[in-house]
Amino acid sequence: MNLPNKLTVGRICAIPVFIIALMMDQRVLACCLFIAAALTDFLDGQIARKYDLVTNFGKLMDPLADKLLTMSAFICLVGLDQIPAWMVIVILGREFIITGMRQVAAAEGIVIAAGWSGKIKTVLQMVAIPVLILENWPCDPYLGGFPADQILLWAALVMTVVSGIEYMVKNRQVFSQ
């Protein structure tokens, strides 16, 4: 197994530890685990492309690991009453739809590449989650009278919807096959 795939597997293995830390109110530890896992998401892709280590395992598991990490965090934050469940349902719905579209397209030999709006969505989610975990620390808790974590959460939600619509419109041929 190459290094990028080991980083992906490590990210998946870190998820239960992250969940336990967060649910046991060990927020600093949970935040550090989340950030480390999020950084491996960026790092494994960079290494795989730079050293031509892209594998079918990585193509499948890297995005899955990313979704497992972010969805685990969002679901735990619902359980901690920090975010409303409906927001997580919208985010999960988008992920299921796009993942399903990609699988259907792949079966037809079509590759649906990640667009910029999807990348922005991921970055916003990866930034919002640690701020939510740490309950706005070290951010100024109020930006223009609104909590920073909520601003980031809403921005991530808006980009989730926008990127989902963009994927569906750009790749509508997947639905017509």
Image (cartoon, helix red, strand yellow):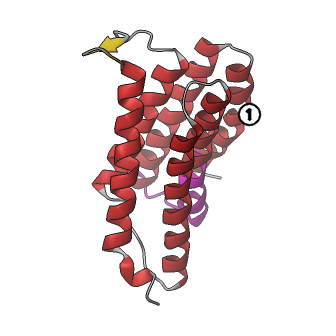
Badge 1 crowding class, 10 Å Cα cut-off, few under 14, some 14 to 19, many 20 or more, is: few
Residue toward you, 20 or 54: 20
Q: Residue at x 42, y 52 (%)?
A: 51
The image quadrant of residue 150 is top left
Picture coordinates of residue 113 (x, y %)? 38, 65
Give the tally of numbered discs.
Answer: 1
- The residue most toward the left is 144
Picture coordinates of residue 50 (x, y %)? 38, 51
- The residue most toward the bottom is 177
Q: Is residue 156 above or below residue 163?
A: above
Q: Is residue 130 above or below residue 71?
A: above
- Report which residue position mark 1 lands on: 16
- Residue 121 shown left or right of residue 89 in the figure: left
Q: Residue at x 49, y 57 (%)?
A: 94
Q: Which residues are magenta?
A: 50-65
56 within the magenta span: yes
Q: Residue at x 33, y 12 (%)?
A: 142
Q: Is residue 98 above or below residue 47?
A: below
Picture coordinates of residue 29 (x, y %)? 63, 15
Picture coordinates of residue 4 (x, y %)? 54, 47
- Residue 59 shown left or right of residue 25 in the figure: left
Q: Secondary structure at mark 1?
A: helix
103 within the magenta span: no
Magenta span dominant secondary structure: helix
The image quadrant of residue 120 is top left
Residue type at numbered disc 1: Pro
Q: Residue at x 35, y 56 (%)?
A: 163
- Residue 76 shown left or right of residue 24 in the figure: left
Residue toward you, 7 or 108: 108
Q: Is residue 27 above or below residue 45?
A: above
